[in-house]
Image: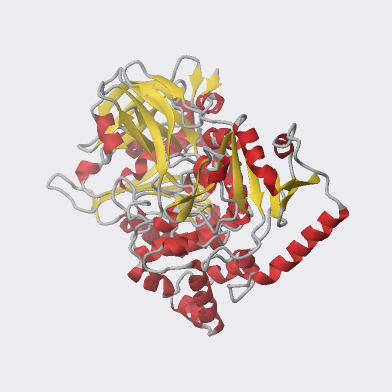
Amino acid sequence: MSFKIMPKAALPDWVTWLKNRYRVVGPTARQGQYVFAEIASPDELVLDYPTSVLPPKKYLLPQRETLFTFDAQSMQMKANIEWEPTVILGVHTCDMHAIRLLDKVHATGYTDQHYQAHRQHTTLVSIECLSPCMEHSFCKSMGTLTVPEDYDLHLTDLGDSYGVDVGSEKGEALLQGFTAIWDPTSEDYQRINKVMAEKWPRFSYRLNFDVTELPDLLALSNNSSLWNELGDICLGCGQCTKVCPTCYCFDVRDEVDLSLTKGERTRTWDSCQIDRFATVAGGHNFRSTRALRNRHRFMRKGKYHLEAYGLIGCVGCGRCAAACLVHITPVDTFNELYRRHKKGELLEEAKQA
Amino acid sequence: MTTLLKETLKHSSIYLPTPARITAVKDLTALEKLFTIELPSGFSLNHRPGQFVQISVLGVGEAPISISSSPSRSNGSFEVCVRRVGSVTNAMHALKPGAMLGLRGPFGRGFPVERFRGKDILFVPGGLGLAPLRSLINEVLDERGKYGRVIILYGTRTPADILFRDEIAQWQQRTDIEFHMTVDRPDESWTGNVGVITTLFPKIQIHPRNMVAVVVGPPVMYRFVLMELLGKGIAEGNIWFSFERHMKCGVGKCGHCQMHHIYTCQDGPSFSYAEIKHLEEAL
């Protein structure tokens, strides 16, 4: 929509200005790591952060959320749709791609009004990543190294100022009435072009093949012995899915108070890596081994989501790799499948099955 | 007249149930009961055979339960056959007529009944598979003239597991139904067939060109019945299943029922073999 310049010196004032109007959330330093948290004062905000432990997803899909409250005696039930006008600052572009997928999932078929309420009242201020954030990220390979089209405000660090791309009316509203913002000069345009041009070479491709080949590679991999190898070392802890920005599966349970009649139905994050995730009441488990559960996760990320929603399910953030206690990583997994494919092993295993 | 689904969609949350009342409870076996559930006044269920509802016992939880009555017999109230197997179904078994439940749905894709018209229909229910299949069987029997031969091959583990005995007695007497049943393990009183469900196939003549087969049963049964049906030459698109999966939401969000890229609660639970034969984990 438009491009503006905000001097870095004006950022604290802007955050304060936003705080008067919204709940403001952003990356903050906690015990040597970075977490998205509500910003109490502008100096807590760290826009130049490597990665966050959890993605900002938690503000759209809280770890625990009440779906409705009930009185089992009177059968009164009341939906609980929660939202708070929120600005999330400093969202990396991988997480922006992830939110784009979450938007699609929750609007496909039946609309999830709980997600939608959070999402409609959330404005995202993303930031261009100018160098790799950590050893495990592979955004360049996944095509998430820059912001997707549907952003609100997008910042680019220009040294002493931020370039501010305005992508939506919601984004524009964050600047309306804030005065320390400038129209760009031709010098600013030159600067942002230089910053962007210098950025690309700093990132390297970490997949040994193009991402567009990933779904077909996985399609050949159903019977690969690699899944058993991963299953043998996987601890089944579910950390990978807990930190994933595109995971959204949930469990539902009823919680009653001491009256034993009043209570609430809640949903909490669940994980397909936990052994009973696909077990039906009669006891049959449709993914009974860690091998099958690992395969399901990687298929979901690299293939199933593309087929179901038109978007690839992994954004290359690397959080699952960083969180895995036994060093199962998507880069190693996909590259190993590719290596075996090149040697003809995948086809051989498929034939034998 | 509104439908339960329209009401569900009107709610500000897709997860909010509508209250409904149990009007009758009938013991079918030691494990299974048939519940008649009455919708609020002015509501209709308007389901298709093969669909399911999410049933809540508030304070305990919610479970997906297939609808057992046919659409034509579900005006204002409908039936579900429930095996006592998890927390929600155990709680349901403790309920008496007059007790209240929460309902959402009906969800999922039912069987494409229109496409079955004019064809011979082979029903293959195994065990509790008769519960969802009864909805389709009675739909077909309610409009018997629209279909060709009606064949039912029913198998249970033991004679004590036989569901809907009254109806089965009627099916056995009707001359326009070919009905055969078998048990895996007989008791002293049993004089009928003994063996797994596939042992019933030699008893019937199949003209594959004009036949639709609908198979619903425990996961282990599908492969064996499928081999039998394919061996008889029935087209892959005319072999239908209903899949059981763990479900929490019923609306394609919670992820539990996913197989391959498909949410069973949305694109199923009814699938033809042609649709799922390439999907890992389907069978």
- Among all residues in the image, which is located at the extreme bottom? A343
Judge from the rendering whether residue A175 lies leftward or rightward of residue A134; answer left or right: right
Rendered position, B48 above or below A274: above
- Report the front residue among A8 and B274: A8
- Among all residues in the image, which is located at the extreme front? A9
User: Total label count?
Assistant: 0
Q: Quadrant of residue A213?
A: bottom right
- Report the front residue among B146 and A72: A72
Judge from the rendering whether residue A31 lies leftward or rightward of residue B238; answer left or right: left
* Image coordinates for residue A64, horizontal then vertical, percent: 41, 38
* Image coordinates for residue B95, horizontal then vertical, percent: 26, 25
* Image coordinates for residue A40, horizontal then vertical, percent: 52, 37
Question: Which residue occupies 69% across, 72% down?
Answer: A201
Rendered position, B198 above or below A220: above
* Image coordinates for residue B112, horizontal then vertical, percent: 55, 43
Question: Which residue occupies 34% across, 25% down?
Answer: A263
Q: Quadrant of residue A202?
A: bottom right
Q: How is the structure coloured here?
A: secondary structure
Observer able to see residue A91? yes
Rendered position, B100 above or below A164: above
Q: Quadrant of the N terminus of chain A?
A: top right
Judge from the rendering whether residue B222 lies leftward or rightward of residue B12; answer left or right: left
Judge from the rendering whether residue A12 lies leftward or rightward of residue B46; answer left or right: right
- Report the front residue among B258 and A174: A174
Question: Which residue occupies 31% across, 53% down?
Answer: A284
Question: Which residue occupies 37% across, 51% down?
Answer: A277
Observer able to see residue B227? no
Q: Quadrant of residue A229?
A: bottom left
Q: Quadrant of the C terminus of chain A?
A: bottom left
- Among all residues in the image, which is located at the extreme right? A186
